[in-house]
Image: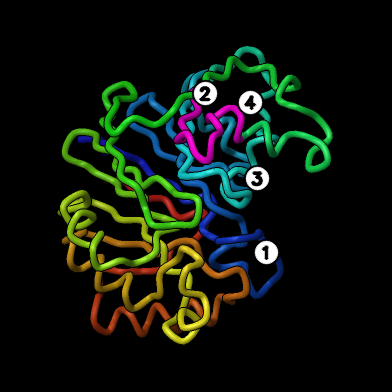
Amino acid sequence: MTASLQIRLLGVRGSVPVHGPAFARFGGATSCVFCLAGKEAILLDAGSGLLWEELPQALPEKHFSVLLTHAHVDHILGFPMFAPLFDKTYECDVYLKYRQGRSAKEQVEALMAPPLWPVGPAALQAAIRFQDVPSAFCIGDVQVRTMEAIHPGGATIFKLTSGEASLVYATDFEPDPERTEAFCTFAQGCSLLLLDAQYTREEYASTKGFGHMPVDQAAELAAACGAKRTLFVHHAPGRTDQQLLALERQVQTEYPNIAFGRAGEALCL
């Protein structure tokens, strides 16, 4: 039996891309996850990980969907440089929630405009359909449900279900006791949880309100929602491989089904 969902992590770094030998193992590209359900290709976020050189060849059709959690630059940085968007034979559906008085298209246009970018969206030749994010919709046979995360300016949490496999993508999510129960119901028993865990407890003392979660609280939340497997994502940009490995070992003493996501990692659900 083939997997209902094939997942590849293309970028798991938060805030800004980083590079250098100290980041080689977990990768320095920002948020992007490639999901394949049969011939349905879905990209979660479009950070610099979108520019993985093999991605255009990995798309099974000339149509793909991009689900954007929000329009902070680290989550859309790769969009204006993604080669299929400059090819008129491709079709792309972009889902991004209406925020701060701007539609999905207007939010992307804000990046691709002077003085931040040299060419506007008119340079993109693919047939791109910008859409708001409903609470539930389908992409082919994949069921998509959403809920709002606590994050400055807002962010969307996505749940993708194909057959018996389910993926919850909850990056840029700050803990809140009032929202914990709703999230646990939303994510209950998912096959894979990709969860924000950017800060250590010590760092969170001075970054509360920035919209990200400390590692210990993320582990508790993953356990509470009964995720079968959890990968932490949105790693702090300065967090080296050795530091991430040390944090991973610490977490796994109590939560053996939790690991820190690595760019290039592939999973079948």
Q: Relative to 58, is 85 on the left or the right?
A: right
Q: Which residue in the structure is indicated by mark 2?
A: 130
- Dot 4 or dot 2: first in sequence order is 4
Whether tag 4 and tag 2 are in contact, CB under 8 A, the answer is no
Whether tag 2 and tag 3 are in contact, CB under 8 A, the answer is no
State the CA–CA distance, disc 4 to disc 2.
Answer: 16 Å
Amino acid type indicated by mark 4: Pro
- Dot 1 or dot 2: first in sequence order is 1
State the CA–CA distance, disc 3 to disc 1.
Answer: 13 Å
Give the crowd class for mark 4: few <14, some 14-19, many >=20 residues within 10 Å.
Answer: many
Give the crowd class for mark 3: few <14, some 14-19, many >=20 residues within 10 Å.
Answer: many
Residue shown at 62% from the left, 74% from the top = 238
Residue 217, image quadrant: bottom left
Q: Relative to 110, is 103 on the left or the right?
A: left
Q: Circle 1 sits in a helix, a strand or a loop, which is it?
A: loop
Q: Residue furthest front?
A: 101
Q: Which residue in the structure is indicated by mark 3?
A: 77
| Quadrant of the image containing the N terminus | top left
